[in-house]
Image (cartoon, helix red, strand yellow):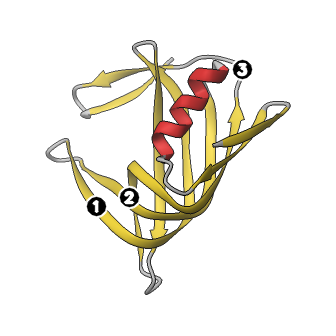
Amino acid sequence: MEYRQFNSKIVLRLDKGEEIIKSIKDLCKAEGISLASVSGIGAVNKANIGLFEQATKVYHPRELTGSMEITSLQGNVSEMGGEVYLHLHVTLTDSTYQAYGGHLNMAWVGATVEIILDVIDGKIDRVKNEEVGLNIIKF
């Protein structure tokens, strides 16, 4: 992982074999980032995405392997219980150009991934909302 900061933005490059979620969390801890928006593109070779079923309040994970392009990585950084909390969604395309999307649980870089964090001066916490079944933003 290499990165450079430009005012409130951090440009991050991840290299083959690095895991995206862990890398972003490590960067946020090292730089004291508790609130940011995240966007990215790149290539991965293994990913775990999830779909939240609203009726049952259960995430259904799906593991994907093979050469895939990240056509969109969007989300945010906040905190929950004093720890860095990432909420990321991803759209991945495979060699047939079929797209898969959902909540990003894990993904391993297959070539390179480029991410931009737009750091926001502030702090937002999350709390578990039992009615919805998700960790929601708490103002």
Q: Quadrant of the N terminus?
A: top right
Residue 46 in picture, x, y percent from top left:
39, 61
Q: Is residue 80 above or below residue 63?
A: above
Q: Secondary structure at mark 3?
A: loop
The residue singled out by tag 1 in the image is 63
Residue 5 in picture, x, y percent from top left:
80, 34
Mark 3 and mark 2 lie on one chain; the one further toward the N terminus is 2
User: As drawn, which residue projects farthest toward the bottom?
Assistant: 96
Position of residue 110 in the picture relative to residue 49 (left or right): right
Mark 1 and mark 2 lie on one chain; the one further toward the N terminus is 2
Nearest the eye: 8 or 22: 22
The residue that appears at 66% across and 17% down in the rendered structure is 122
The residue that appears at 46% across and 74% down in the rendered structure is 67
Q: Is residue 131 above or below residue 55?
A: above
Mark 1 and mark 2 residues within 8 Å of each other at the beta carbon? yes
Q: Residues within 10 Å of mark 3 (few under 14, many from 20)?
A: few
Q: Secondary structure at mark 2?
A: strand
Q: Amino acid at mark 1?
A: Glu
Q: Residues within 10 Å of mark 1 (few under 14, many from 20)?
A: few
Q: Secondary structure at mark 1?
A: strand
Residue 32 in picture, x, y percent from top left:
63, 18
Q: Amino acid at mark 3?
A: Asp
Residue 47's disc number: 2
Position of residue 14 in the picture relative to residue 45 (left or right): right
Q: Amino acid at mark 2?
A: Ala
Distance of label 3 from label 2 (alpha carbons): 31 Å
The residue that appears at 39% across and 73% down in the rendered structure is 66
The residue that appears at 63% across and 38% down in the rendered structure is 37
The residue singled out by tag 3 in the image is 121
In which quarter of the view is residue 108 placed? bottom left
Residue 91 in picture, x, y percent from top left:
48, 63
